[in-house]
Image: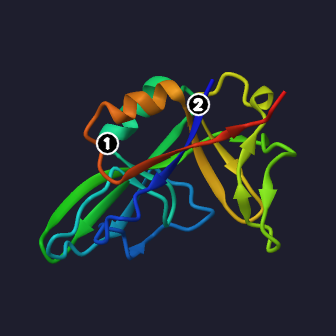
Amino acid sequence: MEYFIVRQDQSITKPIIPFKTDLDDDFVCSSVFGEVVEKENAIYLDYLEKPRRIVSDDLKELLAKYEDNLDFTAIVFTDVGKGTQRVHWLMDIARKNCISHEATYYPDGQLMELVIDPKKVELDCIFQVDGKKESFTIVNLEVAESMLRRPFLGIQLQRVKLEKR
């Protein structure tokens, strides 16, 4: 099986990102409000990495078809000035300790090249890998192909190396 890192497309220079939220690391609630300002030419992306992993309604629907153990919390992007609201979803993904001993690191502990051990992934289609300094959302080939067949905006996929046997 092949796996891919899901990343926010950094070439899109004006994504709409909540600048003020009632979101913190220990939140427990059914929905969150994120204040945004819809500037000219700003774009709502289907995938945001920060402040947390946030997906659009369409992407949530697709991912939920592939993985039962995903949890989503509604986040309502609100532009108070324009009086608009848009629902997105905070995504809580199963964490896997599957980084291979073949992975390479920079001296500061950041991953230079992610290599995963496919035996430790089991049958999960979507999961999160936590490195020493960063974490990654990973999808398998089937999910990646399904994402690419749809007109999602702001998503990049990067192939992940698998441990050699």
- The residue that appears at 51% across and 60% down in the rendered structure is 52
Pointers 1 and 2 in contact (CB under 8 A)? no
Please identify the residue farthest to the right as the structure is shown.
101
Q: Amino acid at mark 1?
A: Asp
Q: Position of residue 57 (x, y in %)?
A: 31, 42
Asked if residue 92 lies left or right of residue 149, the reply is right
Q: Position of residue 6 (x, y in %)?
A: 50, 47
Give the quarter of the figure containing the N terminus: top right
- The residue that appears at 67% across and 22% down in the rendered structure is 123
Q: Nearer the viewer, residue 10 or 15?
A: 10
For label 1, the residue is 57
Q: Nearer the viewer, residue 160 or 32?
A: 160
3D distance between C-alphas at marks 1 and 2: 17 Å
Mark 1 residue element: helix
Q: Position of residue 39 (x, y in %)?
A: 18, 76
Q: Amino acid at mark 2?
A: Asn
For label 2, the residue is 69
Q: Quadrant of residue 135?
A: bottom right
